[in-house]
Amino acid sequence: MAYFLKDRPCPCDCDQNGVLAVVCCPECGKLILVCDEIGNAFDNLQDPLDSLPLVIWGGTGQKCPTCGSVLLSDFPCADLQALLDGGLSLDEVEDGGKQLAATIRTHQRN
């Protein structure tokens, strides 16, 4: 499964057509938002419109901005417990299902 933020437009070059999927550092639990259209990654969960992209997803070698031990491209989709532990509520997210998870994995490989 893959979850995305509800009611928060994507701030990147997708012209706000993308959804912001939530991925999670398997080492420290840091949550990152990833545009499902382009693959830009953002770390401001509360106001993604007020953040610059961390990376264009995939192949950059950039690591977790919190612990520095895991490549962003190796972050799995956040599960429900990771979302709650990261400070998101069930009202803020929606399940995008297997299709969204597959899209995020595609961005990670490119």
Image: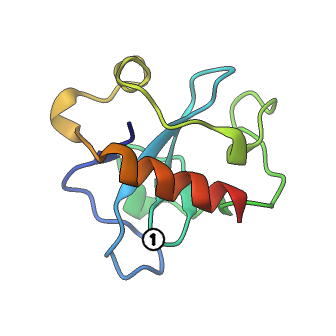
Up the image or down, 62 lies above or below 106; here it is above
- Dot 1: within a 10 Å radius of its alpha carbon, few (fewer than 14), some, or many (20 or more) residues? some
* Quadrant occupied by the N terminus: top left
Q: Taking 105 as reference, is 82 left or right? A: left
Position in image of residue 42 (x %, y %) = 53, 54
Q: Position of residue 36 (x, y in %)?
A: 45, 62
Q: Say left or right for 91 vs 61.
A: left
Q: Is residue 85 left or right of residue 25?
A: left
Task: Tell which of 65 and 17 is nearer to you.
Answer: 17
Q: Which residue is mark 1?
A: 37
Residue 89 in the image: x percent, y percent? 24, 27
| In-front residue for pair 2/93 | 2
Q: Residue at x 81, y 60 (%)?
A: 60
**Residue 18: image location, x then y, percent:** 36, 69
Above or below: residue 91 compared with residue 57? above
Q: Helix, strand, or loop for circle 1?
A: loop
At 58% from the left and 52% from the top, the residue drawn is 105
Res. 15 image quadrant: bottom left
Q: Is residue 69 above or below residue 21?
A: above
Question: Could you tell me which residue is drawn at 22 percent across and 50 percent down?
Answer: 6
Q: Residue furthest left?
A: 91
Q: Amino acid at mark 1?
A: Glu
Q: Residue at x 42, y 26 (%)?
A: 79
Residue 64 picture quarter: top right
Q: Quadrant of residue 84?
A: top left
Q: Is residue 96 left or right of residue 39?
A: left
Above or below, 44 relative to 85: below
